[in-house]
Image: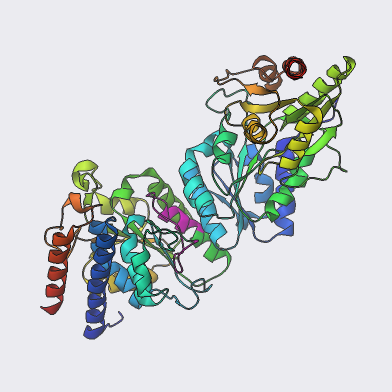
């Protein structure tokens, strides 16, 4: 079993590191500081953290004002609540191309206790549809730490999507991460699973099961949803001929859509999509239960892989 | 109290009239735009750009400049006219407004137009963006001031009051907001569509310093701007009572002139009135 680490704590600690390295890093938060762990930053740099209360539209615009003057604002709330400020993100962040870092925590179904109002299953679809906005979904606590530095240094708006959960670690310190680059975690030539976030670890488990049936599965961690690492996807399509995407998000408009939009125009091959199948998910006892029962279990991935392999064979 | 000589007031008044002529010409030529809310803020804009704001047209992003956000972005015509007359770009460029490849978009775009500090158009954003600017100025120990011109109609939106709470919490006395209170919006009179009153009390209860003026009286505008800089513990809002469509009799107080361009005949009449007004 993999090592389990808190994504939230990793973020909170990495934010302090970024704040130490860059004086321009400031934090704006909408009354969720102790939840999303910006309280670590507040303790260290109290004069650089601004809590605007439960006013997400204001949250984003305050970040915009700070960015206009050369600061690097990280604005924080739950991913589901950040969508309240879609208009501010579109006009004042995307269209105005302000260097605001939008951090959506508690994403996917990771806020399992609170239910559908607090789940964020369409945030990737929304954010990636806004020009100028880069979308990053780290796979684990290690990647959160490594990627946050990249996000701070990236010149332009970024949506950084975080899980509430303590999640299995899949990357090691030796993995190099950078915005716009996916990583091949396991090699394989029969099919490719392109995954993001917590689904990377589940995809690796699926790959191990498939391996027992003699299926060599390539698993890619696609932590940057936008801009897509097209070379890596095209190579996977050409070399393996079948793709399954896996994400903790609606299958409408997320990673699967991104990959299929590109593949359908360049190298059409059979694809299957793992994610939430256009439904609202109920409250659960833990996130794993919800992933397992709403279409994102390891078995679901294995089944999708076998299905896509069948279609690949029929195509020949 | 600072003294402003009569000829300076007259100069700013003449400039307001010139901006009205420019804006109407632009709207007529383009066949699109927002005459009512452009004409209502002519004195506010002329006073800001030709007397008050510390800006340098040669260095639009001069770091010590005062920041200005036209939160009611649909009044872009009069802002562009002011920027052109102030020297940020040639007056002839005003004719390109809304045309392909123009630096002058339908609504202000900070990335395209020299002198535009912030993009606007969808209403309500200015005050909370100003909040971020105000915090930035404090962090930088900078002396520049943030001015926001809002419409009355946009104060019906919640984000304005989110921004108000935030500016109050952080005692952002480096923000002066101005409301162009012409009491007319797209669908009719503000007091019928969604009443703002008691407007002064609302802002006072949000812990703003409130100054109420006649928004067409340049002396009052100047005095209010001076006074707002003397307030050091809270943000200021200047509630400027204005007339929508001011200066063109048939446009005044008429909601239908919110976002419609005059035809040739109407344009001729409007220009004639404005020119006549100037010669009185």
Q: Position of residue B64 (x, y in %)?
A: 51, 74
Residue at x 65%, y 60% (from the top left corner):
A24
Q: Is residue B197 left or right of residue B96?
A: left
The part of the image, by quadrant, that contains residue A115 is top right
Residue at x 42%, y 74% (from the top left corner):
B88
Please state the total of marks drawn on the protein image: 0
Q: Quadrant of the N terminus of chain A?
A: top right
B161 to B232, vertically: above or below: above
A88 to B280, vertically: above or below: above
Residue at x 66%, y 18% (from the top left corner):
A290
The part of the image, by quadrant, that contains residue B8 is bottom left
Q: Quadrant of the C terminus of chain A?
A: top right
B50 to A88, vertically: above or below: below
Q: Position of residue B249 (x, y in %)?
A: 11, 61
B14 to A91, vertically: above or below: below
Q: Position of residue A3 (x, y in %)?
A: 84, 30
Q: Nearer the viewer, residue A284 or B110?
A: B110
Q: Is residue B129 one of those drawn in magenta? A: yes
Q: Is residue B110 in view? A: yes
Residue at x 12%, y 65% (from the top left corner):
B269
Q: Nearer the viewer, residue A314 or B244?
A: A314
Q: Is residue A220 left or right of residue A296?
A: right
Q: Is residue B212 in view? A: no
Q: Is residue A94 one of those drawn in magenta? A: no
Q: Position of residue B138 (x, y in %)?
A: 54, 65
Q: Which residues are magenta?
A: B111-132
């Amino acid at each position: 079993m993999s090592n389990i680490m808190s994504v939230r704590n990793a973020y909170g600690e990495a934010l302090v590191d970024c704040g130490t390295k860059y004086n321009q890093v400031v934090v704006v938060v909408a009354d969720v500081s102790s939840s999303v762990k910006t309280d670590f930053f507040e303790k260290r740099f109290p004069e650089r953290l601004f809590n605007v209360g439960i006013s997400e539209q204001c949250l984003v615009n305050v970040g915009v004002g700070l960015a206009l003057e050369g600061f690097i604002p990280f604005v924080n709330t739950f991913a589901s609540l950040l969508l309240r400020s879609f208009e501010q993100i579109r006009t004042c962040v995307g269209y105005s191309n302000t260097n605001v870092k939008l951090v959506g925590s508690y994403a996917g179904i990771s806020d399992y206790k609170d239910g559908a109002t607090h789940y964020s299953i369409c945030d990737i679809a929304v954010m990636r549809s806004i020009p100028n906005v880069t979308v990053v979904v780290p796979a684990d606590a290690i990647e959160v730490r490594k990627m946050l530095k990249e996000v701070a240094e990236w010149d332009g708006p970024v949506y950084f999507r975080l899980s509430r959960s303590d999640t299995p670690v899949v990357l090691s310190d030796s993995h190099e991460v950078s915005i716009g680059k996916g990583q091949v975690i396991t090699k394989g030539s029969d099919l490719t699973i392109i995954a993001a976030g917590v689904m990377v670890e589940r995809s690796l488990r699926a790959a191990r099961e498939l391996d027992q049936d003699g299926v060599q599965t390539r698993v890619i961690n696609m932590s940057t949803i936008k801009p897509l690492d097209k070379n890596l996807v095209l190579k996977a399509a050409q070399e393996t001929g079948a793709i399954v995407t896996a994400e903790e998000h609606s299958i409408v408009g997320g990673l699967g859509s991104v990959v299929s939009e590109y593949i359908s125009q360049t190298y059409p091959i059979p694809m299957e999509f793992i994610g939430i199948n256009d439904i609202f998910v109920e409250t659960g006892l833990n996130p794993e239960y919800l992933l397992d029962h709403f279409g994102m279990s390891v078995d679901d991935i294995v089944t999708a892989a076998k299905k896509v392999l069948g279609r690949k064979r029929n195509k020949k | 109290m600072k003294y402003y000589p009569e000829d300076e007031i007259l100069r700013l008044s003449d400039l307001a009239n010139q901006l009205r002529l420019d804006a109407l010409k632009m709207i007529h030529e383009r066949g699109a735009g927002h005459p009512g809310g452009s004409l209502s803020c002519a004195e506010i804009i002329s006073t800001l750009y030709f007397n008050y704001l510390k800006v340098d047209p040669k260095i639009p992003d001069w770091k010590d400049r005062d920041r200005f956000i036209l939160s009611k972005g649909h009044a872009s015509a009069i802002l562009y006219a002011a920027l052109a007359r102030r020297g940020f770009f040639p007056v002839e460029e005003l004719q390109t407004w809304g045309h392909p490849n123009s630096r002058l978009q339908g609504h202000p775009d900070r990335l395209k137009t020299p002198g535009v500090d912030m993009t606007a158009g969808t209403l309500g954003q200015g005050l909370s963006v100003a909040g971020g600017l105000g915090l930035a100025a404090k962090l930088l120990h900078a002396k520049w001031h943030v001015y926001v011109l809002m419409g009355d109609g946009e104060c019906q939106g919640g984000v304005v009051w989110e921004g108000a709470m935030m500016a109050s919490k952080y005692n952002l006395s480096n923000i002066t907001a101005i409301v162009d209170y012409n009491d007319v919006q797209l669908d009719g009179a503000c007091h019928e569509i969604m009443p703002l009153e008691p407007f002064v009390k609302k802002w006072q209860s949000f812990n703003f310093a409130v100054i109420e003026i006649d928004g067409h009286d340049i002396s009052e505008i100047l005095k209010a701007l001076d006074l707002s800089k003397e307030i050091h513990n809270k943000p200021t809002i200047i509630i400027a009572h204005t007339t929508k469509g001011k200066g063109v009799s048939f446009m005044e107080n008429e909601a239908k002139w919110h976002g419609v361009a005059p035809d040739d005949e109407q344009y001729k009449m409007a220009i004639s009135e404005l020119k006549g007004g100037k010669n009185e």
